Image (spheres, coloured by chain):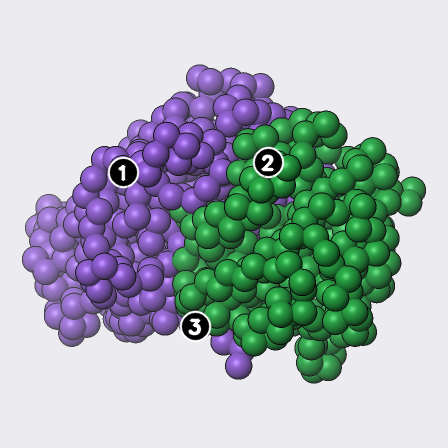
Amino acid sequence: MYVTVHDQNIFVSTGGRAFNPDAPVLLLIHGSGQSHLTWLLQARFFANRGWSVVAPDFPAHGLSEGKPINSIPEMADWCHDLLETLKVDQVTAVGHSQGGLVTLELASRYPKKVSSVGLIALGLTIGVNPALIDMADNNEMSAFDAMLSWGHGRDGKFHDHPMPGNSHVNLGKRIMADNPAGTLSADLRACAAYQDGAEAASKITQPAMIILAKDDQMTPWKQGKAMADAIPHARTITIADAGHMLPIERGDEVNQALRELLEEQKAK
Amino acid sequence: MSKSFRFDTLGLHAGFTPDERHGSRAVPIHQTTSYMFENTEHAAALYNLEVGGHLYTRISNPTIAVLENRLAAMEGGVSAVAVATGMSAVFLAVTAIASQGDHIVASSQMYGGNINLFEHTLSRFGITTSFVNPTDHTAIANAIQPNTKMVFGEVIGNPGLEVMDVAAVAEIAHAAGVPLMIDATLNTPYLMQPIHHGANVVIHSLTKWIGGHGIAMGGIIIDGGNFNWGQNDRFPTLTQPHFAFQGVNLWEEFGPSAFAMRVRSEGMYNIGPTLSPTNAFHILQGIETLGMRMDRHLSNTAELIAFLTAHEDVAWVNHPSLPNHPCHDVAMRQMPKGAGSIVTMGVKGGREASQVFIENVQLASHLANVGDARTLVIHPGSTTHSHISATAMKAAGLTDDLIRISVGLEDIKDIKEDFDRALKMARKSIMSKGA
């Protein structure tokens, strides 16, 4: 569905089901240079199991118009405003990578809006090599290639994909290339500038599910574990033989972990 | 360390994760029709496109999926659907977006089967086609109508060997808001990857060079993922609710792989030209050596062209590598490694001499195929293209004396000796009748 946020036409995937604000809402927040398609294996899955899925494309990503948002706190504010637009009181917020940093900010600054959090493949900060930002500025395709290479485990690097016929690397590259030029660079700068993760994590009192990849080259497992240790009510699941793009690379295991969290919230 | 694997490496490894339970290093043949569901929820999830996996081999199969992933990787596509034959691939690709009342702009210089499909079969279902010369860019632009759904052509026409300037035609198609669909069988991804030149969907007959052994039929549709299906209202099969899967909007929910999803979710479900898993395995064996074989095809082709061009009994030789070929420059720019291993020629003495030549080759095989490891010869006018109209035959550049040669991997000296003997027999036959 399309909604207007800050006077911009924004696409929100609802997993193929009509949005129902009265059902428990699952907010899925994508990472740097990505789109709602990060959640290819989550959006339909949870939408068909009773959750009202809200998987937006940030401005200048996927099918949304506008210009990139320049900081993680502003992205969190934007998510809050999206939920206000949709008249949603409370969500389970799940973020991947940069989307995880946004989730930390959203959950810590708007605790009433977020009943539980899922954090996939990130640390308290996401270190971005200046060379990668330079590449994103001057040769975006090379930056996509580098990120997709670092971002996948063995299966993904060799184009294996849970959906028959899909190429992990080429599909990921196309998703990134479909965003307007400069989008990745803006996202990477926002990640690099964000240093408030430790403070945000300490304020998260909601139940948290941390899902980490053992072979993550983008946000190494140790950093993810440090984040988990900084969040008071965190459970951590580590997926072996997988890389950074966990939601697609290991969709079934991610869904199983998130479902555990969501079912608990539903029971409350 | 950033790492993108190269062509020959992808041909050996892409799309396959060695089996954890048994450790099989080669791709196993999953010769099964169906798959055990974990529970009823898992079954429903598979049927509703919520999770990855296989539910019935008509739709997908683990062995076939390796082939699909591998060729998607080698062509630079985002997704692929493998099918029983190249012809069924063309049919499924076209009908994924074209419906009754729609229109196609297609090359007039195509394989006879493609021409017949567009001219006689699709027209019965209300899909009309305007055939234009693929080198006439003005004609292509002028032929596009408000109801046109695609421009369709072959990189190297069969058997005329005209070469489409893919980037230029893609630009024309895109300016009109339609995709460019390419049958790339004669060039294979080794010589050229049309998606990198702007094509949006690539089709192969896998039966030809990609398999290379002449033992297994197959076809594939590769989605470039590089066309914005939501830019206009021409593509409702991708941008409007699907008739199944709870009305999924494929463009919104699957993005760049929407086209491949439509092919699989309608073409394989409702039509079902399924590739045999065993054939998928055979074709995978061919792909493992595609690069090496193509190098040999190309070197043999170059040497045979030089031999035929100098031969006193050969009337003419046609191949895009020849400087006098009208598409020579485009061919060399698009396919710097070489312009394929199909050569056409006429024997002095016309159709009769050409037929005598075909009947007297001993090493080369007279049969209806191309891209085999063995050298093949045929007279298309009386065989592969005999069912198309005289007008279409003329448009396709099919002369009465044309012999199509698919240059194989034999020792080139043996091929030349075989051809020399058959050419002399043709001369002798014509001379004896003349006397």
**Colour chain A is painted in:** green
Q: Provide the secondary structure element on which disc 2 rests.
A: helix
Distance between the alpha carbons at the discs numbered 1 and 2 = 34 Å
Seen from the viewer's position, the closer of residues A78 and A205 is A205
Q: What residue is disc 2 on?
A: A267
Whole-percent x, y for residue A12 in the image: 72, 40
The residue that disc 1 covers is B35
Q: Nearer the viewer, residue A187 or A145?
A: A187
The chain letter of the purple chain reads B
Disc 3 from disc 1: Cα separation: 33 Å
Residue B254 visible (yes or no): no
Foreground of the two, A26 or B257? A26
Residue at horizontal 80 percent and vertical 37 percent from the top: A89
Q: Amino acid at mark 2?
A: Ala
The x, y position of residue B423, in whole percent, is 16, 59
The residue to which callout 3 is attached is: B6
Image quadrant for the N terminus of chain A?
Answer: top right
Image location of residue B135, percent across then percent down: 56, 49
Foreground tag (3 vs 1)? 1
